[in-house]
Image (spheres, rainbow, N blue to C red):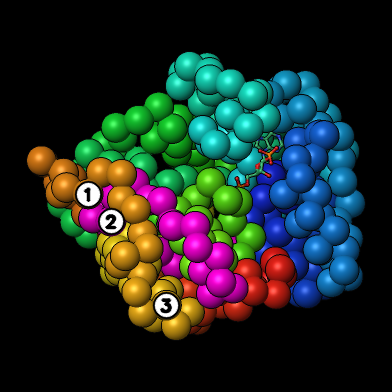
Amino acid sequence: MKKILLTGIFGQDGSYLAEILTSLGHQVNGVARMPLRAHAARLCEHLGSKGVTPILHECDLNDDESVTALLRHLQPDECYHLAALHRSSEASRQGGEQSESAMYLPNVVSGLNVLEAAATASPHTRIVLAGSCHMYSGAVVSPQFEGLPFAPRSMYGLAKVAVADLARYYREERGLHASVAILYNHESPRRTDDFVTKKIVRGLDRMRRGESAPLELDNLHAVKDWGFARDYAEAMTLMGAQSAPRDLILATGKGRTVGEFVETAAGLAGISDWQERVRVRNPGMPARPPVRLVGDPAAAYGVLGWRHSVSFAELIAHMLECEAQGSLG
Ligand code: NDP
């Protein structure tokens, strides 16, 4: 049995990791932000209903002493640092706008605190940190691969790059087993409502139940590389189990537009007149289309022996089915 620490345990990925690691017989410890938001509280309850009852710890991830005390006390074999703020989670918590830099600095500080705490108080702990495709938003090649220089174009992406640079420092200079999972979009019934996939699935489910409200979307041309969150959680556990730490891209390698997502979902939901029922706020093609943010999963396939278990259509079908049942999957 391994002792595991998950930060952001009641987020989408944390909840799948908690399930997977519990099913493997490991002791799962978690840090969540208190008070739990409604969605996190639902996920906590959902895990409980499946017999997944992690040990929760009080810890302020933005306070170095608090993180060091936790790692010194717990001495986990592995730590998955998933906790991160993003615009929608923060806006709803704070009830207003906050500057981008103020919002994302805590993502850097918490990453640094986890790495430094492990280095000083629990150096055997293997750390997997959540990176993002937004580390490559300004890349000029597609698909992106691990050797490509990072090119963030947002404060969120910059914060993720800073954490990846810190992880490299702690790996190379301080001997930590630290890896970054460079995550492309991954979805599930556990997404919050502010993500486009959940909006689409929810909107189409309402139409399926006879509601007339249109589905409002920003643009149908945006391209995403969408996978299933549980598959990515599984890949992260394999990264933690590797003998040598290494940053890896977790992606499907296939870009799909938001329009393709809507069309596939509408087909599965049996809504043939979806084109008349979707309102698009910015229907034009972007003047200068960005490079497609699509990740090359070849290295992860080779190193981890990992594969996707769920296709694009299967992911959407699963989300639609759970939406109809009011289930978190
Ligand atoms: P979620 O937003 O679902 O989960 C993140 C969790 O972290 C939330 O429960 C949040 O709590 C919690 N959290 C934030 N700050 C803190 C803090 N200071 N202390 C404790 N908990 C905190 O995200 P995902 O599970 O989808 O993503 C996991 C990680 O992967 C994140 O780092 C994200 O940036 C990254 N990622 C995800 C992608 C995706 O497609 N899902 C793509 C690329 C990267 P609260 O509910 O209070 O906000």
Regarding residue 245, the answer to whether it shows in the image is yes
Dot 2 corresponds to which residue? Answer: 220
Q: Nearer the viewer, residue 73 or 219?
A: 219
106 vs 30, left or right, is: left
Residue 133 in the image: above or below residue 110 = below
Ligand 1, seen in the image, is in the quarter at top right
Q: Nearer the viewer, residue 42 or 263?
A: 263
| Residue shown at 44% from the left, 67% from the top | 227
Tell me, for residue 13, which label it has, or none: none
Tell me, for residue 271, which label it has, or none: 3
250 vs 73, left or right, is: left
Find residue 11 and report its horizontal and vertical position in percent.
Answer: 67, 50
* First in sequence: mark 2 vs mark 1: 2
Q: Nearer the viewer, residue 248 or 83?
A: 83
- Kind of residue indicated by mark 2: Leu
Q: Which residues are magenta?
A: 207-236
Which of discs 3 and 1 lies nearer the camera? The answer is 3
